[in-house]
Amino acid sequence: MNCKKCQQTNPCTTNNDCACEVYLTSDCVNNVKTEFECLDIATGLSLTETLKAMDEQFCVKFDTITNYFTLINLGTGEEVYKGVNNLGQKEFKTLVKTGNLITITSDANTVIIGLDETALNTYVEANQKLTVVSNAGSSGETLVNTAIVTGDTTNYPIKRIIHSAQNGSGESVVRDLQVNPNDLTLRTKKINSSTLTITSNEDNTEVLINTPTSATIPALYVNNLYVPTEAEFLAGNTKGNGSLAKPFTDTVTAYVAGVPTIAPNTAIQNALDAYVDVANGGTRLTPQKIGQKIIVQNNNGLGYNTPENFSYNGLYLKLEENVNTTTTDWVIDMDNPLYFPVNNSRFIIEIAENKSLDFSQSIGFRNSGNTDNTAPPFQTQRVGGFLGEGTLYTSYNGVDVLNRYIFNGEGNNNDSSLHFEVRCKVRADYQGVYKTKNRMRIDFHNQIQSGVYLGTVNIALKAFHMEGGQIRFYEKGAIGISAETSGRTYGLTFEPIGAGIGNTRFQLNSATVAGNCNYAFAKLNNEAVEFIAYNSPSGDGFSTTLPGNPTPMAGLFQNLGVTPWSVNFKNNVFSYTGVDFTKVDFTQGNGVSSVNSIGNFLIESLVSYPSKAVAKASGLPVNSKFLKRVTVNAVDLIAGVEYKVATSGSPSLGTVGSYFTATGSETGTGTAYLETIEIL
């Protein structure tokens, strides 16, 4: 049947005229009443509406189901889910272990990843090194500071080593902290002593410093900075015992409310008393501790005062601080038989650099030598020695100052033996330095310039007054005379007292003389003085003229005797002064020649002979230079030749010593010298 001829006009009506099959559309089914348990679809819709709603619900459900079955790897690590294969199968990677430290097992529901602790311990022991920072031992200061934990990091700070200045006074035991490429070295000083016993105990844990017993103590120390404590005072220690730990000090006489009462200026005397030790029979002449030094220690510039003299046999007094003795007696009197033996005795005073022994009231030091005149000479000596770089100083300006000298030696005839040996500096502002008689001798060594110094107040004062005896200056010795003002008449005076008692001898050997005076060296009478000077220079200040006489060439030597003073003066350099050769003879009676630089002149004093034949016959060596001096009578003078007046005669040729050129017509009784330099 051709149904095209009978199309439905109403799709919802089943009737048709062409006997064709009639199809009803879903739009024709209304009011669907079925309720959907899993789908969210309303009831009462048409079938078409219901089907559309179901389609929508299925799409949502299928999208949800598809999302449930999608596998993805999270994070950035190694992916376990591999993906979907061609068959739509989901693929996962298999877990595989390597080595023995990790274990992988599984059961029906679980994959178990574990750690093999036994294998791990074996591996750590075999391969890992553990570093531990800790302090050795259980005592002492730790170098490891408190640990600082930051997250997974633990920091162990190490304390620094610092070498800082030590507090308090005294010598540091630490030398320094030396930084080396691989280590730090804290260097220390060794402890040493020439007077104490320093040892270590058996296990080297202690340093032992012990004071020797009193029988062997090498010195008696003085330091008035030490004050015995009240407990020590009550136990009988009132003045120390002379050790380094408890040096002699000013005596403590009482303690009141913890405050000591101190007898001033007793410290040195306490040491001297211990040196004598009267309790055991000692005297100044026979001290019980003879041979031991008394060391007066530096006490920070406070100085020491003492009214006592130092007349003790065998005394060795070392002064490391300023000391002033106010005794009005001799500082040391070796001539007193209660203090020193008459023969063979000695004392020594040593003065430290920049320190001084002052004796403003005392007379000085006396030693007239011993009485031993037996042959051979110099069998015994009585000598006072002065050592060190410090100064022996007196400022005395009292009664009879012109007759006072620091060193006085006048008395015994002891074969010209040494009685004072001076190696320190000496200064006297108002009194003389040295007076000697007979055969006494004083030697000066190693002073710096102006080491022996004479003050300026009294211009009549004489630094050295010699009536016999010897004064000797050696290399580096120095004399300073009136170094601040001019006008002094004599510097060094020589007044010999006659033959048969002892020669007067003064010697400069590369020593220095400086100062202001009209005459550096003055001989006060016509007796002989042996004056020797070699290679000695002078400073400025000596006169260039005689007092009241404008004629130059004066001031170095003065001679109040009649005969010219014969001196041994060679290779010396004296500035700003001159020589009057009517008063001094450098040739020593025509016996020697000499060369000296004096003032602005090179003075060559030659021995003189009337001819070469006489010079040779007199023993002058071949090739020696000499002054040929021929005496010519006035009537024999040759015109045009220059002569020196020998005798004026009558009519006068002129003043003796003056020069003139002859005319050839001279007459009379005068004579003249014709002088030339010759070589034999």
Image (cartoon, rainbow, N blue to C red):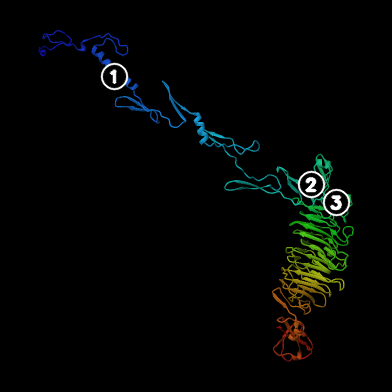
Q: Which mark is residue 273?
A: 3
CA gap between label 1 and label 2 equals 116 Å
Tell us which disc is closer to us: 1 or 3: 1
Which residue corresponds to mark 1?
59
Pick the front one: 277 or 568? 277
Is disc 1 surrounded by few (<14), some (14 to 19) or many (20+) residues within 10 Å?
Answer: few
Q: Does residue 371 lie above or below 498 as drawn? A: above
Q: Does residue 534 lie above or below 249 as drawn? A: below
Is disc 2 surrounded by few (<14), some (14 to 19) or many (20+) residues within 10 Å?
Answer: some
CA gap between label 2 and label 3 equals 16 Å
Q: Tell me the quarter of the picture where residue 426 sits.
A: bottom right
Residue appearing at x 32%, y 24% in the figure: 89
Task: Tell me the quadrant of the picture where the N terminus can be found.
Answer: top left
Pick the front one: 398 or 434? 434
Q: Which mark is residue 246?
A: 2
Sooner in the amino-acid sequence: mark 1 or mark 3? 1
Considering the numbered disc 1 on the image, is that residue within a helix, a strand or a loop? helix
Dots 2, 3 in contact, CB < 8 A: no
Q: Is residue 123 left or right of residue 639?
A: left
The answer to whether one can see residue 111 in this image is no
Q: Tell me the quarter of the picture where residue 623 sits.
A: bottom right
